[in-house]
Amino acid sequence: MKGTVLIVDDQQEYARFLNKLLVKFNYQTRVVHTAGDARIAMKQFCPDVVLMDKNLPDADGIELVAELKRVEPNTQFIVITGHASIKSAVLSAQRGAMDYLAKPCEIEEVLLAVDNAMSKKSLTEEVQLLRSTNSRSSIPAKPQNNQPYKTPAMKHAMELAQRATRQKGTLMLIGESGTGKERLARWVHTHSSRKEGPFFSLNMGALSHQTAEIELFGHEPGAYGNARTRKKGLLELADGGTLLINEIERMDPALQMKLLHFFENRSIMRLGGEELIPLDTRVFVSCRVDLSELLKTKQFLDDLYYRINVFPIHLPPLRERKNDIIVLAREILELLATDLGLTPPPALTAAANKKLCNYRWPGNIRELRNVLERTLMLGNETEIDENDLPMDEPEQSSWHILVSFPQKETLHDVTREVTRKLIEEALQRGQTKQEAAKLLGLSRHALAHQMKALDIK
């Protein structure tokens, strides 16, 4: 498929004509007839391009473009109307539409407008990608001044990262969003023998299949409708260096096959090309879920999984490494203070430290950085107290676990695991075993008995 197109037109016969035309030319489409349905489709379908009728029964199409453009700024809009005028064309451009067509449209006119919109979206995402690649990452991977992490899981992760700097295989970083996977990947790259080579990063979750394929493999002139020049993909641009593929679990199966071919042959072929290009690119991948679970449902290729699962490193969420929070907060403050010209950085009071440690940080290190950045911009330049930190108090009811119907396990096994999770959560929330027991409605003796039975340290 070339891309996704949403058709918003209350004239059902004309909408069917546009739909049939675009499907014939390998676009994936969806048709709606009202503004209300268009708002829903934008969230569910995530189109690359929207063909918007100016006159809808429940809204003005041009104003709807402005509304939807604020939600999805990269999506390209083309306004179509049976009552064309210079005034409405100008207004469409002002509201964010990139093109304006008068009904009845010629077939070539529609196809050219959609192709141009697809190219503009691809270019916009490419520019954003390169800017994010070249920008400085502000999530620390390792404390400065050789200050060690205190959490065993993070100590182990950094020991593995040290080893990864001396290896050549694929590094797989596993952890929730915001746990610092990309920053750690950059750290491994800059401490490896490839440090003089380039480092690129590509997020699969932010791209359509076609855009992701082009970004990875590049294309030759004429490879598709509007490909007038040659484009090198990131696998090729990272030759001699490192490419990080973020959220690889969201990669399309067809693209997984092409990536597997690269791992097996260490070469690629650009879209529309006829020659294999040998490459020396080290690939890192990151994921937010356990890929082995996706193998069971055939959502991820077995062969590719075994290729990338060479050197896995699990990054724990911040709520499971509370002993590191103050270390991380101080380093982030140093980085932010340098950027803002604040020397020395403001100190954290004991009350502020306690508030930071008691918060659950659903957004992990990324959220910690955002909180500290807002605090620096709005608060005292010499000292940060608990009242300066813009976080809500943690909600005790916000935690949940997923329980599946027992299949291979017995009911006893499932309830035992649920009990374990609840006790571990209570131990995280309580400062002492007595507080944890109180949260669970148990005596301290009963909690100790359960911990011993479940082998919880």
Image (cartoon, rainbow, N blue to C red):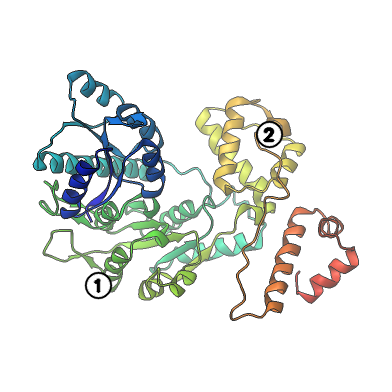
Instruction: Point out the tag, 1 or 2, that comes first from the N-terminus.
Output: 1
Judging depth in this view, the residue of 377 and 114 nearest the camera is: 114
Q: Residues within 10 Å of mark 2 (few under 14, many from 20)?
A: some
Measuring 60% from the left and 69% from the top, which residue is drawn there? 404
Q: Mark number for residue 227?
A: none
Image quadrant holding the N terminus, namely bottom left
Q: Position of residue 227 (x, y in %)?
A: 14, 48
Residue that badge 1 annotates: 265
At mark 2, the secondary structure is strand
Could you say which quadrant of the image residue 356 lies in? top right
Quarter of the image with the C terminus is bottom right
Query: In this orientation, does residue 144 appear?
Result: no
Q: Position of residue 347 (x, y in %)?
A: 68, 34
Label 1, secondary structure: give it: helix
Looking at the image, which residue is at 57% across and 43% down? 367
Q: What amino acid type is highlighted by mark number 2?
A: Ala
Residue 23 visible in image: yes
Q: CA distance from mark 1 to mark 2?
A: 53 Å
Name the residue carrying label 2.
347
Give the side of residue 267 with respect to residue 283, left or right: left
* Residue found 34% across the figure and 53% down from its top: 196
Mark 1 residue type: Asn
Depth check: 294 or 4 in front? 4
**In which quadrant of the rendered view does residue 410 lie?**
bottom right
Left or right relative to 369: residue 37: left
Query: What is the x, y in percent for residue 186?
Result: 43, 53
- Whether the residues at callouts 1 and 2 have beta carbons within 8 Å, the answer is no
Nearer the observer: mark 1 or 2; the answer is 1
Front-lying residue, 380 or 29:
29
